[in-house]
Image (tube, helix red, strand yellow):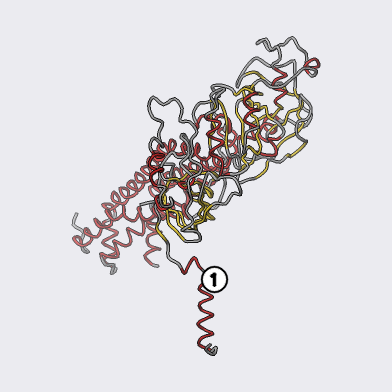
Amino acid sequence: MTPLTRRRALALALATAALARPGQARDVIDLDWGDLIPEGETAILMEQLRGIGVVQHGQLSTGFTQERDAELTTEFNGARVRLPGFVVPLDFSASGTSAFVLAPFVGACIHVPPPPPNQLVFVTTERPYRSKGLFEPVYVTGLFDTVATGTEVAEVGYAISADRVERYR
Amino acid sequence: MILLRLALRSLASRHLTVGLTVTSVALSVALLLAVDTIRTGAKESFANTISDTDLIMGARSGGVQLLLYSVFQVGNATNNVTWDSYREIEAMDGVAWMVPISLGDSHRGYRVMGTSTAFFDHYKYRGGRDIAFADGHRFDDLFDAVVGADVAETLGYGIGQEIVVAHGIVSFSDHADKPFQISGILEPTGTPVDRTVYVSLEAIEAIHVDWQGDGRSGVSAEEVRGMDLTPGAVTAALIGVEDRLRIFALQRAINEYREEPLLAILPGVALSELWSLVGVAEAALLAVSAMVVVTALLGLAAMILAGLEARRREMAILRAVGARPRTILALLMLEAVTIAAFGALLGVLLLYVGLLITRGWIDSATGIYLELSPPGAREGLILAAVIGAGAAASLVPALRAYALSLADGMTLRT
């Protein structure tokens, strides 16, 4: 065991300081929606996404078929991520929306069955985001986590506490 | 400094033309700012009208339409929701609370909404504010009514006042045999709540019992109290969910409801759809008022240009006392900027005076509540743009004057 020199103490203090602010020390991971599906689940997703987003002709009812038991990935928990998507506002005021669901395509959750939980992200943001409309894609940057809603299966699998919401370009 | 004094004196000596030009710039700036204020004011009014309601349910129509008639009192429902369905949905998983809305009657042009007292608990506006009572209390007797602030003020109502509800939105057939008594008056909210008369669902049912169409019914107000007043149908309902993350299942369940065609909407989504519709008209209005400003600034440039010919002698004298052509250029631009700046400031003044005078009327006539806030960054930016554009427009006459003073020198050839 090496003696605790002054320099070592300083280095240790610096390291703890860096650990205390994980958001700033770590880089932002650029995610895409495929990353949110754990390995081996991809085939199911493609089957599900077929016909989602629009009501098909000759289809009387879209039915209620959200795939509830889709697996969630915990790989990015606690990481700062950036994810593009479309906004489904849950709450709104004159200054914009501060709680919304981020979905991979326009119209998700509105007129058709929602995509599986691992394809929906609940976003909360301190600074309300003033959306230009439902068809405007955005980039959400923030702390990523899986949603834990007790024993029940969540409809929305992930959550991001966003520090930045900007227009996608 | 000398230059500024010179410019001001020169403008003062031509006060009539300058005055007219300043006025035209001022009017155009006021118009532009007014359009912008009303645009943002309308948006805020709409966005602030309802808050903390997760879903709105009604008969199947369009999302925007449902939002408009249930919350904003624009347009009408195409159909009702039966009370059985209402009860069944109220019992669904995930529903925390549900407030019924029954529309279709009016009182002297104000809509009458049949609802439950839960409305006063759950209806929130402007970021979660509760509606408060200025006077009195909620309806508890069958023929009690609660009125919004505008209704009470415009019609001069107080607690205990008897009012008669009419059938239809604007109508000559009254439910005169069953008058209501005002039990409460609400605080102003700046939302459609101010222009609504609230009664209980049972009261709506009661005034329509055995209703003949000529405004009379075979059942008297006293007899009706003993009857079963369970409503047959409601127009719409506001729904709060237990968990916002499980909102979609409930929405789907309502939209897929087998017994009758129903529609559930997320208010925020419907509002977004409405904005994208209104956005086009909004952009057109802004473009037109911006064009008016451009026209006024061109008028400003034309006025200075027209004055140049008459001022050639003045320029020659300035040159004679040592002004360089560059100074002449600066002088003319300074004049233009002064006019534009005065115009812009006068425009802001006009806007605020106009707002102060018409605000109340706009609120009661259109329901758009315009907040009177000090000019912000956006207004500052617009003013800076106007003054900058004025300077740019004045480059034409200023450069012309520069060239003339070079050519003329001190000897004026006429």
In the image: residue B402, left or right of residue B168? left
Quadrant of the rendered image containing residue B259: top right
- Nearest the viewer among B411 and B246 is B246
Percent across and percent down for residue B322 are: 28, 69
From the viewer's perspective, is B31 left or right of B315? right
Residue B291 in sight in this render:
yes
Residue at image x 57%, y 47%? Answer: B372
> What residue do we see at 59% from left, 49% from top?
A149
Please provide percent x and percent y for residue B324. Answer: 26, 67
Mark 1, chain letter?
A: A
* In-image side of B77 versus B278 (left or right): right
Image quadrant where residue B176 sits: top right
SS class, disc 1:
helix
Relative to the observer, which residue lies in front, B379 or B19? B379
Q: Looking at the image, how many numbered discs can be counted on the residues?
A: 1
Q: Mark 1 is on which residue type?
A: Ala
Can I make out residue B339 in this image? no
**Residue B7 locus on image (x, y percent):** 37, 60
Which of the two residues, A100 or B360, is positioned nearer the viewer here?
A100
Mark 1 Cα shell of 10 Å, populated few (<14), some (14-19), many (≥20)? few
User: In the shown orientation, is residue A156 left or right of residue B214?
Assistant: left
From the image, tell me which residue sits under label 1. Answer: A20
Q: Compared with residue B240, is residue B319 higher up or lower down, i.e. above or below?
A: below
Placement of B218 over or under A26, stated as above or below: above
Give coordinates of residue B121: x percent, y percent: 70, 39
